Image: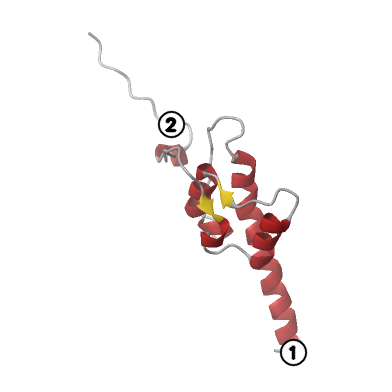
């Protein structure tokens, strides 16, 4: 019997798969690092989210809530599992933090702080 060939992943970052177990989500109030404006928009907006789905919670943790630039990500999950918000939430949170930092820097330069 011939030896099985081990395939090398196309991209190096694909070497660290994370398996997400089905289960209950994480309440939004327990999501650390989530910008308060984003939290309010999620909880009181049109959809009125109460929790992150498991895939969203894992992605949030892996991407450090939008504060990490050291990760690339590929999600394989069924339709309706929350992939879109999983991708978007860290990006929007990172932009919200950046906007806050720019505003603080402008105030500091103008002597308002």
Give the residue at mark 2: 9
Which quadrant would the C terminus be assigned to in this image? Answer: bottom right
Q: Position of residue 48 (x, y in %)?
A: 69, 52
Residue found farthest to the left: 1
* Quadrant containing the N terminus in the rendered view: top left
Residue lying at 64% horizontally and 54% vertically, measured from the top left: 91
Asked whether residue 27 is in view, the answer is: yes
Look at the image and tell me whether residue 68 can be seen: no
Compared across the picture, whether 103 is left or right of 89 comes to right
Whole-percent x and y of residue 30? 51, 60
Task: Determine which of the numbered discs, if any, sits on residue 24 in the image.
Answer: none
Count numbered badges in the picture.
Answer: 2
Q: As rendered, which of 25 and 32 lies closer to the eye?
A: 25
Crowding at label 2, few (<14), some or many (≥20) Cα neighbours within 10 Å?
few
Quickly name the residue at label 1.
112
- Residue 45 drawn above or below residue 73: below
Q: Nearest the camera: 59 or 12?
A: 59
Label 2 to label 1: alpha-carbon separation: 52 Å
Q: Position of residue 37 (x, y in %)?
A: 69, 65
Q: Residue furthest bottom?
A: 111
| Chosen colour scheme | secondary structure
Which residue is painted at 56% across and 49% down in the image? 52
């Amino acid at each position: 019997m011939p030896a099985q060939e081990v395939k090398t992943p196309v991209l190096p970052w694909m070497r660290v798969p994370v398996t997400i177990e089905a289960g209950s989500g994480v309440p939004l109030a327990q999501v650390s690092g989530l910008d308060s404006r984003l939290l309010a928009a999620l909880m009181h907006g049109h959809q009125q989210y109460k929790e992150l789905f498991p895939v969203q919670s894992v992605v949030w943790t892996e991407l450090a809530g939008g504060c990490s630039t050291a990760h690339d990500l590929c999600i394989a999950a069924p339709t309706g599992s929350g992939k879109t918000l999983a991708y978007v939430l860290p990006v929007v949170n990172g932009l919200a933090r950046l906007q806050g930092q720019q505003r603080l820097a402008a105030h500091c330069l103008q002597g308002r702080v």
